[in-house]
Image: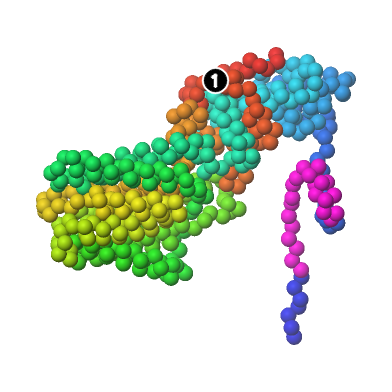
Amino acid sequence: MGSPPRAPTHVAGVVTCRGDDYETAVTRSSTILTRAAVLEIEPVDLDDAATFLMATGPSAQDRWGPVVGQLRLQPDVPLARALTNPLMVSLARTVYAAPASDHPRQLLDFADQAGVERHLLEAFIPAAYHHFPPAPGTPTTSAPGRYPPEQARRCLTFLARHLDTLATKDLAWWQLVDTIPRVTRVISIGLTAGLIFGSVGVLTQVGVTDPTYRLAATLAFGLVFGLATGLSYGLHKQPTPLRVDMRFQGTLRAFFRRFVPGLAIGGALGLGIGLPYQAAFAVALTLGFALAAPVWLDIPTDMAQISSPSVVLTQDRTAAFSFGLVLALPVGLGGGLVVGLPTGRAFGVTGGVVAMLAGALVSAVTGGVLGGRSYGRVGRWMFAFTFAVVGGLVFEPTDDPGSHAILGPAYGIIFGLAIGGVGVLSRAWGAYAVSRIWLALRGKQPWRLMRFLEDAHRRGVLRQSGATYQFRHARMQDHLAHADPTSQRGPCRPSRRQSQPRCPSNLPS
């Protein structure tokens, strides 16, 4: 007998949208989902609004009772119309929750509904950052007063305008780098890389007696690496977050596709500059692993399976440092071997044109592979040129065993860390780290930006949507994005002193 037929599988789902958008979609498509239930939110009834507003305790009943009584007598005043909106009811409860706050009777004095709504939107953030106690187990450094209301509003206004510029409602931490002008990114990253790699260049020229050549080579070392890193960072499309998943199954073919070319390039590089066969083989192995090992690490994050933005941040930070470490260890070891072992007389040529061209060629291929891995097509050409200049024109090895014994480990460590830093900056967390420092130095955001966002989420200012945050309502974001910039004063830095709420001067009393 055959197995009984399986019952059909039904997939249930809930789709939310605005009523006008739904009606427009049905009109244009002429299609109605007859088996789908359509629920529409009705305006809030005055009795329901009153119950919600006075549910916080006797004080709320004493304060809201006269106001509700007046609304029953005049059901068409601006405040009554405003309180039919669920958002406005929630804002009103938060704004006037504390007994020390203004009396809600002032809401009856507004001449129109828009004025009531603007007032509630404006007063919500000071109330949220003053009245709400810290969550259980929260450190005292993040208690109320750490972010004074006026400074929290300044930070949130900056974020709202950032989202308005991107025409999105999703606040993604990896997109905050877009708040930094592209030219500024190129200059800052390039200058930092130039200084780091310039110090590496100093080590390669310790054994050179000509001071003019030593200075020129050091400057060239820092200049070419600074330009390559800065331009690659500025022109490369910012990546999305990754997570580290050490998965070896199914990666053997991809690993050898990267390992074999790296092995060949490393061997050619070592032999081309005159290293002994053992050292050249070590360089080949390290370069091969540097190119191939990332296939075990980088796996795109599935945003639909992420529980919070902080989880995405933690995963991508781990992925960024893992990728940087995979580059730093082999490259640092290979560079240390190149400098740390006395060079031989490869092919009977010592410091001649053939050796220079051979070093430039193999260095260009190496740099192209490493740059492409970090920054795509832009990085491939930038770092190919950079490595060619460094490998063929700048580096002048010495045969002094004492100098090699000292310079080799130092060069390997610094050069490996520098290359690892380039790899970290190419990841989403690297871009976030740069943007976080930049915004904090300019007073636009606190130093611990993610803690500030988590705190805003706890206070009900932001809501979580998978891997991103959103303002609790689109109207809140729009209100902040188009707020009067003259009302924003003071840097957004945390304060340990309790700050008393202060309503902006442009609010009606």
Please check the rendered image and state whether residue 30 is part of the magenta-colored stretch, yes or no. yes
Image height of 470 relative to 256, above or below: above
Residue 121 in the figure: left or right of residue 161: right
Q: Disc 1 marks which residue?
A: 489
Image height of 494 relative to 8, above or below: above
Residue at 37% x, 60% y: name it: 291
**Magenta range:** 8-31
User: Looking at the image, which residue sits at the far front?
Assistant: 353
Residue at 41% x, 59% y: name it: 294
Residue 391 visible in the picture: yes
Classify mark 1: helix, strand or loop.
loop
The x, y position of residue 301, in whole percent, is 53, 54
Relative depth, front residue between 209 and 431: 209
Relative depth, front residue between 151 and 159: 159
How did the renderer colour the structure? rainbow
Image quadrant containing the N terminus: bottom right
Other residues around mark 1 within 10 Å, as few (<14) / some (14–19) / many (≥20): few
The x, y position of residue 253, in whole percent, is 43, 70
Residue at 77% x, 18% y: name it: 110
Residue at 66% x, 16% y: name it: 506
Relative depth, front residue between 14 and 2: 14
Please check the rendered image and state whether residue 3 is part of the magenta-colored stretch, yes or no. no
Image quadrant containing the C terminus: top right
Residue 181 in the figure: left or right of residue 72: left
The x, y position of residue 288, in whole percent, is 33, 63
User: Looking at the image, which residue sits at the far bottom?
Assistant: 1
The x, y position of residue 72, in whole percent, is 87, 22
Amino acid, disc 1: Arg
Q: How many marks?
A: 1
Residue 56 visible in the picture: no
Relative depth, front residue between 86 and 100: 86
The quadrant where residue 262 appears: bottom left
